[in-house]
Image (cartoon, rainbow, N blue to C red):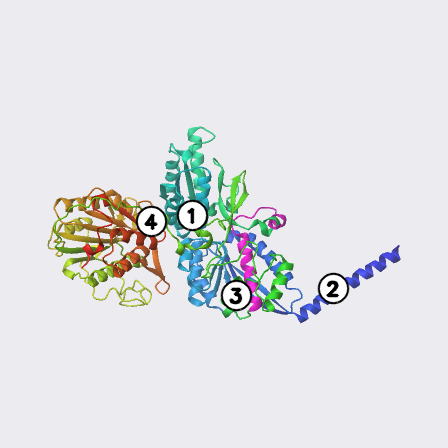
Amino acid sequence: MRKITRTLTIALLLTVCACNNDEQTETAVQAVRNYKVAVVVPQEEQERCSALLDWALKNIEEAQRGLDERVAFTLEWKDEYASDLDRWLKQVSMDNSYAAILGPTTSECARIAAMACNSYAKTLVLPIATSVELQRIYGKKDYVWNLTQSDLTECEIMLQGAKQYEQTKVCLIAGTGLYCQSYSDWMAYQATETGLEVGDIRIYNNEEELRAAVRAESKHTDCEERALIFAPASADDAIIFDDELGKIVEEEQTYWIDFPNLLCANSMNSSSLKGKIDKAYYYEGFAPISDPSTGFTTAYISRFGEEPTTGEAQLYDGLCLLAYALTIESDVQKLNDAIKTIVDGREPWTGSWLPTDMGEAMAALKEGRHPDLSGASGDWTFDDNHSAVLYTTYGHWIYLDGEFKTVEYLSLEGQGSSTSTLQVWDWDTQQMQTFSESATELSYDELKERWAVVISTSDTWDNYRHQADALAMYQLLKRHGYDDDHIILINEDNLANNANNVYLGEVRVRIDGEDVRRGADIDYKLSDLSTTDLKDIMLGNEGERLKKVLHSTSNDNVIVFWCGHGNNGKMAWGSNKDIQVEVIKDILSAMSEEGKYRKMLFVVDACYSGSVGKACEGIPGILFLTAANEKEESKADIFDNNLNVYLSNGFTRAFQETIDESSDITLRNLYYILVRRTFGSHASVYNSSMFGNMYRNTLEEFLE
């Protein structure tokens, strides 16, 4: 017995030695290319993410057994909330010893990283930064790779969920910041396109406003008809939301309260919230997750003992994508092009994210083949700009008894939805106003002169586009026959010589476009005028301070172009002041009563600009053309990475281009063109019944 045991022991030792010798031989023969990758996640998430990426590293290493050369990674971790993040990201972006940056996870930090990587040609892979604005800005730039669709898709899935629950109205509570902006900017537009009525939109800036919003939503009597989307800016905000609901339950001494059907954004689906919420409500929502067909979720649960929440599969895929690309390209300077080659591969491949299949894929790549690869999250097909994946799977999750559970998987792929195959810059609006061709034509006095008032109500560098659009409108009016005596231009005029302006002395509305500041006769700086002054200018009340005013009569047409920020019921007047829409109504009503115009075309490009038109309905002879309805935000257009600002607004660009293309276009056709060319908001017409037939009135009446 001892002899047999000894023989087996010797055999086992020989086997182990043989294996070790084989490994040593393989290690000696197999060349290893090691790359540094910076991983940026919150400090409190690093332990969990480290365990996940250790798993990825082991699988990547195993996949490369038998290859003559393998790729290895050294991960360097950084807290994405560190005070020196901006400086550190710039240093890493300039350092060629780093192959790429993986993360950050939040959209605000991801934008900082994207700016640095775009400036210094460093590859950035973003697993779960889903801001619409972020993907819009960098959608046509190299070096930024989004492994999740923007929140435009998630919001659309939420709205479809509301319809399935037979809700007819949708409301919103959202924080501020780049991530929450996706919902505050787009929800109303998408809801209208989906056929839902838009209810309250509550944007909170602090804890007090958030608690007030929760209480306001708890007081509705039509809760069964309402869906409420909640997009918290942070985990702390989710806890505050839950706490306020709990207080209401305690005050009303009931186990449950009437509350709209609550659908939460993916920021609520966080492991950091486990055990901290669920005082008074059953939470549910939607979050990017792994395609169930990949088997990643099952493997994750087996390995870590819990379900993944948001972004684990995408983080895992980020490292695998880099490994694939570096398999075919050793030079980190060419890594971005190598990733394009990887994601554009279309040769049939039925493998998975598991090591054996990855090894086969890497071998194929080394042979010059181009397999159609996918990952743990699912499909890796990117849009034409190589900005973001086209298909993301969303988990419909519930939070109950301290745990997140996925109850179903959803995707817009194959459902004919615009966001399943197109990115946000390709929206096509389906909801349009209609006008009667037989509408009564109103009687007007003879037309004699034309006047214009052009107003930019912004005064900061970040809002560059508003002043630029106003200056472009001035140049357009000059091209179409206006002289300076008949244009009143209100513009802060602090862009051309601004310290941030790399095109010193110039203001542009197009990249490499003409200087729209050149030759502009600016009559007033915005900061020099009060809203009372505006009324005097419009009514022709000349004075010592107001030397240039409208001298229009009942025989004169007036075009007003207004661009800036707005909110429901008010428009911005500089950085720290507002003008209520009722004040604008009072000014225009006074102009009507005093015969200060024949016809007026009032064009407003601002968020919630429809609230101006709605408030002023009933004033004779004025047609309001707005960039958005009273529930929506308008959208900026043309981002200049050199200036780090938007140059123009989409509606204004469409409006001005249409005028130059066809200055005699009917107002009905003008509206339809603007609807088609304005993305992300519904260009709208107000007060047409008090103006005249949209088919017969033309833009030519306001141009020379």
**Which residue: 43% across, 51% down?**
418
Callout 2 secondary element: helix
Q: How many marks?
A: 4
What's under tag 4, amino acid-wise? His
Question: Dot 2: few (<14), some (14–19), or many (≥20) neighbours within 10 Å?
Answer: few
**Mark sitting earlier along the chain (4/3):** 3
Magenta span covers which residues?
A: 299-328
Instruction: Please give the residue where the numbered disc 3 appears in the rendered image.
Output: 341
The amino acid beneath tag 3 is Thr
Query: Crowding at label 1, few (<14), some or many (≥20) Cα neighbours within 10 Å?
Result: many
| Disc number placed over residue 233 in the picture, else none | 1
Q: CA distance from mark 1 to mark 3?
A: 36 Å
Say whether disc 4 or disc 1 marks the residue closer to the N-terminus: 1
Specify whether 672 is left or right of 361. Answer: left
Q: Position of residue 506 (x, y in %)?
A: 27, 66
Q: Which residue is mark 2?
A: 19
The amino acid marked with disc number 1 is Ala
Mark 4 lies on a secondary structure that is loop
Near-viewer residue (21 or 488): 488
Q: Nearer the viewer, mark 2 or mark 4?
A: 4
Does the magenta portion include 309? yes
Q: Is residue 364 above or below residue 203?
A: below
The tag earlier along the polypeptide, 2 or 3, is 2
Q: Is-magenta flag for residue 547? A: no
Q: Quadrant of the C terminus?
A: bottom left
